[in-house]
Amino acid sequence: MFVPTRAAGLEALADFVPRAGSAYARQRNVDTGLPRTNVSSLSPYIRHRLVTEREVVAAVLEQHSLSAAEKFVQEVMWRTYWKGWLEQNPEVWRRYRRDVAALIDAGSADTPEYRDAVAGRTGIDALDAWAGELVETGYLHNHTRMWFASIWVFTLRLPWQLGADFFYRHLLDGDAASNTLSWRWVAGLQTVGKTYLATASNIARYTEGRFHPQGLATSAAALSEEPLPPRSPIPSAEPAPSGRRVGVLLHEEDLALDSLRREHSFLDDARVVSLAGYAEPGSRSPLGASEAVGAFTVGALADGLARAAHGAAAHAVGAGSPDAVVEWAAAEKVDTVVIPYAPVGPVAERTTALRAALHDLGIAFGTARRGWDALAWPHAQRGFFPFRTQIPQLLAQQGIPASPLR
Ligand SMILES: Cc1cc2nc3c(=O)[nH]c(=O)nc-3n(C[C@H](O)[C@H](O)[C@H](O)COP(=O)(O)OP(=O)(O)OC[C@H]3O[C@@H](n4cnc5c(N)ncnc54)[C@H](O)[C@@H]3O)c2cc1C
């Protein structure tokens, strides 16, 4: 269903753009099952930046006014919002990683209740079908993700972190910020005290009668947690120093080097002497990632590298350890390695070790952050609603013409 190339992402975008206006606003909450035409199914492409958020929004606003496409643009901005919020609250990610590891160590992913839930054997018709759909296709509709998470937490009373881990291991669009924070939102941790309760009537209505789940929880008391530390400043990007032999290392967070180059002169062709790619989909979880996620991620990386190299052979460093990357940098005699900025998540985690290993060899390290993120993230301090008011200004700053009416 999802081909891991930019060409396939652009094709899906072109196909969807005519439906991104009022049709999307009216119909987006319905999960029709396959084939889906009311939502874009673009998330696996956007998440790896085979197609960027900017491109998606610009293409939509070429055909629709901002008021007609407001809902769609807001959904794309949710993704940016979650990322900006997590950048400023990295403790949430650290705790999630720690909790998942501890729960797995303690055998919580080995109980009959957990095993039934992920194998689709709970007897709740909808949940069982969705678990199968997730494993088979690597995708679930947004409303379905909300229902699934709600039933997992409030009806099955399983740990939210293991539900998030199940999603993260199987979603082709699996994303540290959108996934973790959406699960927290359902559980009443993200907007403290506000939970999301899935009801049988809502599910029957928005699945067009495909499901009539029985025995769902009728109340949803918010989970609680230790208070979080205060928000921290967004880490600075590390602009690459004046290296003469720059090596660019692509990774699964951002595979659109051409547009990143247009924003950062230190990535221009004259100085970039070598390209490599390093993806490690298995680092999503102590239980690894599904085969489908592995294949999509590796395919997307190969596509990103081939485009970045403009057909020349780019050196694809296999997933494994930072050692292979260090060997590449040394063999290519680069004096600087630059990566697209990696937001909070597994890529940022492994970057820490890589930076230190390169430093030991006297190789400088830099990150290139997109204007899209740099402009929007600082606004992701409170809830989405104040963030949303910034959208027209952010689009203008990105040079995206957005007529209020057309
Ligand atoms: C429990 C839960 C877990 C989730 N996990 C992820 C995840 O791991 N990765 C992920 O990309 N999204 C996640 N989402 C958000 C959302 O469900 C998906 O982005 C969306 O369903 C993707 O389908 P689409 O491309 O057809 O969306 P469309 O409705 O066509 O939306 C267009 C684009 O907007 C963005 N978007 C839409 N809705 C959201 C949202 N609620 N939050 C953030 N971005 C959004 C996506 O990039 C999407 O491709 C999660 C939501 C929930 C409730």
Image (spheres, helix red, strand yellow):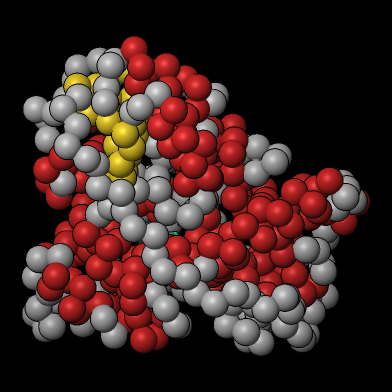
- The answer to whether residue 381 is left or right of residue 12 is right
Q: Nearer the viewer, residue 311 or 12?
A: 311
**Camera sees residue 178:** no
Rendered position, 265 above or below 124:
above
- The answer to whether residue 378 is left or right of residue 21 is right
Which residue ends up furthest to the right in the rendered image? 112
Q: Ligand 1 is in which quadrant of the figure? A: bottom left
Q: Quadrant of the N terminus?
A: top left
* x and y percentages locating residue 92 in the rendered image: 60, 65
Q: Which residue is depicted at the point 45% across and 82% down? A: 383
**Camera sees residue 270:** yes
Q: Nearer the viewer, residue 173 or 104?
A: 104
Q: How many marks?
A: 0
Q: Which residue is depicted at the point 40% across and 32% down? A: 359
Q: Which residue is depicted at the point 62% across and 57% down? A: 94
Which residue ends up furthest to the top in the rendered image? 331
Q: Quadrant of the C terminus?
A: bottom left
State the image quarter where residue 365 is shown: top left
Rendered position, 20 above or below 286:
below
State the image quarter where residue 81 is shown: bottom left
Q: Which residue is depicted at the point 39% across and 37% down? A: 251
Q: Nearer the viewer, residue 361 or 262?
A: 361
State the image quarter where residue 250 is shown: top left
* x and y percentages locating residue 108 in the rendered image: 85, 53
- The answer to whether residue 156 is left or right of residue 168 is right
Rendered position, 270 above or below 1:
above
* x and y percentages locating residue 69 in the rendered image: 24, 74
* x and y percentages locating residue 320 in the rendered image: 54, 24
